């Protein structure tokens, strides 16, 4: 094999090795599938009101486990629970996760299933629809920086119009289940794309110079 041909093959092999190596790099989101021994490793729980909780359950969309956020409110009260994590992201990356959720509401109650995102002064609140089965969700991030990601489940009990607040016969209930949370492509993969482009460009330049 000639020296020039060996150089060309070496460039392509180097690119292929880079591709194979990337498969072993972990997601930037810590414990996005909730499979760690302590199921909430990497996540921070925030609660408002006494009737809210986060539970690790065994019916995940990927793997075994998932996280269930549950909030219930009655008597004119409000209850909410959030699960949050911060991660460095680049504009153009996608936040992806699987979720399901349901609500049980009296006529004077309401509930929200949300994802709150913030990077510096940029903020976006995504409202999730009620889904009885796991549904894949994705959102393209428009800003580079440290992303503050929060899944929020909130229930509110309100008095009927024209009446003072009073206990209702049925509480407002909201439940949000999440799994397989990740940001793609991974930062290392973004670097890989640039590396491969440089390798291919170098190879094309070298071939034209022959």
Image (cartoon, helix red, strand yellow):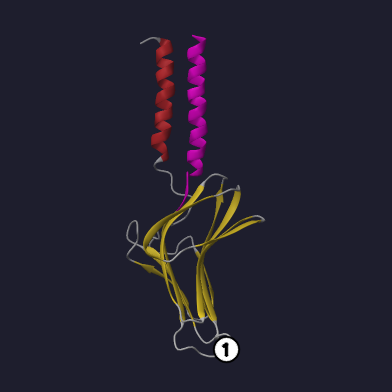
The mark tally for this picture is 1
Q: Between residues 159 and 135, which one lies in front from this camera angle?
A: 159
Where, quadrant-wise, is the N terminus in this rendering?
A: top left
184 within the magenta span: yes
Callout 1 secondary element:
loop
Q: Please, is residue 12 above or below residue 24 in the view?
A: above
Classify 10 Å Cα crowding around label 1: few (below 14), some (14-19), many (20 and above). some
Give me the residue at 45% from left, 49% from top. Answer: 27
Q: Main secondary structure of the magenta part?
A: helix
Q: Position of residue 51 (x, y in %)?
A: 48, 80
Q: Please, is residue 130 above or below residue 165 in the view?
A: above
119 within the magenta span: no
Give me the residue at 41% from left, 34% from top. Answer: 19
Q: Image check: 192 left or right of 36? A: right
Q: Please, is residue 17 above or below residue 124 in the view?
A: above
Q: Is residue 189 visible?
A: yes
Which residue lies most toward the front here?
Answer: 162
Residue at the spot of label 1: 165
Give me the residue at 51% from left, 64% from top. Answer: 114
Q: Between residues 159 and 94, which one lies in front from this camera angle?
A: 159
Q: Position of residue 144 (x, y in %)?
A: 60, 47
Q: Position of residue 145 (x, y in %)?
A: 61, 49
* Magenta extent: 182-210
Give me the residue at 40% from left, 19% from top. Answer: 9
Q: Please, is residue 42 above or below residue 144 in the view?
A: below
Q: Position of residue 165 (x, y in %)?
A: 57, 89
Q: Is residue 154 visible?
A: no
């Amino acid at each position: 094999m000639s020296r020039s041909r060996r150089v060309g093959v070496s460039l392509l092999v180097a690119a292929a090795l880079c591709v194979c190596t990337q498969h072993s790099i972990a997601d930037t989101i810590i414990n996005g599938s909730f499979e760690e021994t302590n199921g909430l490793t990497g996540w921070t729980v925030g609660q408002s009101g006494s009737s809210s909780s986060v539970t690790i359950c065994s019916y995940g969309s990927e793997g075994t486990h998932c996280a269930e956020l549950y909030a219930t409110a009655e008597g004119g009260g409000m209850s909410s629970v959030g699960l949050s994590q911060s991660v460095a992201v680049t504009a153009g990356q996608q936040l992806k996760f699987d979720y399901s959720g349901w609500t049980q509401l009296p006529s004077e109650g309401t509930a929200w299933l949300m994802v709150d995102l913030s990077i510096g002064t940029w903020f976006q609140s995504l409202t999730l629809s009620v889904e009885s089965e796991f549904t894949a969700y994705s959102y393209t991030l428009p800003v580079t920086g440290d992303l503050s990601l929060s899944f929020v489940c909130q229930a509110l009990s309100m008095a009927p119009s024209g009446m003072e607040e009073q206990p209702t016969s049925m509480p407002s209930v909201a439940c949000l289940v999440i799994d397989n949370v990740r940001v793609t492509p991974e930062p290392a993969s973004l670097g890989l794309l640039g590396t491969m482009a440089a390798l291919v460009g170098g190879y094309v330049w070298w071939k034209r110079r022959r």
